[in-house]
Amino acid sequence: FQTTALRLELGGTCVCVPFYRVMTMAGALSLSQFPVRGSVSLPKRRIPRRSFCIRGMSEISSTFSVSTQQEEPTSNASSVTIAPPPNFKPPEPKRFAIRPDKTSEVFGALLPLLFRFATGVFVSGCPFCRKVREIVAILDLDVLFYPCPRNGPNFRQKVLEMGGKLQFPYMVDPNTGASMYESDDIIRYLVDKYGDGNVPLSLSLGFLTTLTAGLGMLSRISKGTTYTPAKFPPKPLKLWAYEGSPFCKLVREVLVELELPHLLVCCARGSPKRNILYQKTGTFQAPFLEDPNTGIEMFESAEIIEYLRATYALQ
């Protein structure tokens, strides 16, 4: 079993799209040529998983240009030494436990799940970015995200250079060469190319879909949107997560704020990648973070957030 993630660049609210390059207001990501490997029996699918690029934004600007030849982002901060906090030890995973100081944040992150009728929780054979993330979870795709928070210095300009305007989400599929803005167009493309051609009902209601996606974000409206100065990692991080989990949402917000490119290994309910993670760690729990820059691998959303800020945020 092998998948290659898409590139995804987001600019206000983070969106994940497997095997695509995507940019959104919450951040920008790149998934191409970032493999996930494991051994597991999979049902037959019409088309093998491959790598894509998706870039998307929730803003429009007339002064954005993109070079489609530049696959890997660069940053002046890339020479900064990346190291975990002194004496850091990853915590043991705790099932069904919420750390007391994170209770309000977790319940706030649950709101989208209620408004969106659990869309993105199960695998099936900005609010616009969330819609794309949901179809990525449903189709069980892996995505490389290039977060594009407001004032982010690394990836927002790439969207303009590649697509010609500052708008989210924006997707590039390196398997076909297709690139596009507009969440509904991206969803239709993905289900036609990598699904059965049918858009799920919860993503086909037009304005009502967008409205409920927006209402679900109200409790976290200021999170994951504005850049926090941070060290730029030499290699993308890897996050095992899925859209419907409030714990995964909290971690994703911080990855976007710090503008950390990361491969999203989508593992919604029903995904065979849950078994891969279980074989790797001896348990399944999401989120699970792998940082190739420090060698740290860890569960527990609250501790992952603290690790990311301690390791990458510039004090």
Image: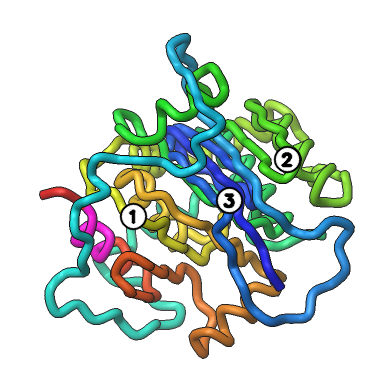
Among all residues in the image, which is located at the extreme front?
69
Question: Which of 89 and 161 lies nearest the eye of the viewer?
Answer: 161
**Which stretch appears magenta?**
306-312
Question: What residue does disc 2 label?
Answer: 203
Do labels 1 and 3 touch, CB within 8 Å? no
Q: Residue at x 45, y 17 (%)?
A: 64
Q: Indicate yes or no whether the magenta region holds residue 271.
A: no
Q: Main secondary structure of the magenta part?
A: helix
Task: Give coordinates of residue 87: x percent, y percent.
Answer: 14, 79
Q: Indicate yes or no whether the magenta region holds residue 307.
A: yes
Residue 12 picture quarter: top left
In the rendered structure, which disc, 2 or 1, sits on the residue that comes first in sequence? 2
Question: What residue does disc 3 label?
Answer: 32
Question: What residue does disc 1 label?
Answer: 234
Q: Please name which of the two marks, 2 or 1, marks the residue nearer to the observer.
A: 1
Q: Please name which of the two marks, 3 or 2, marks the residue nearer to the observer.
A: 3
In the rendered structure, which disc, 3 or 2, sits on the residue that comes first in sequence? 3
Residue 178 picture quarter: top right
Q: Quadrant of the N terminus?
A: bottom right
Q: How far apart in space, not on screen, are marks 2 and 1 (Cα)?
A: 36 Å
| Disc 1 secondary structure class | loop
Q: Residue at x 64, y 52 (%)?
A: 18
In the image, residue 46 above or below residue 38: above
Would residue 147 be seen by someone viewing this image from the given angle?
yes
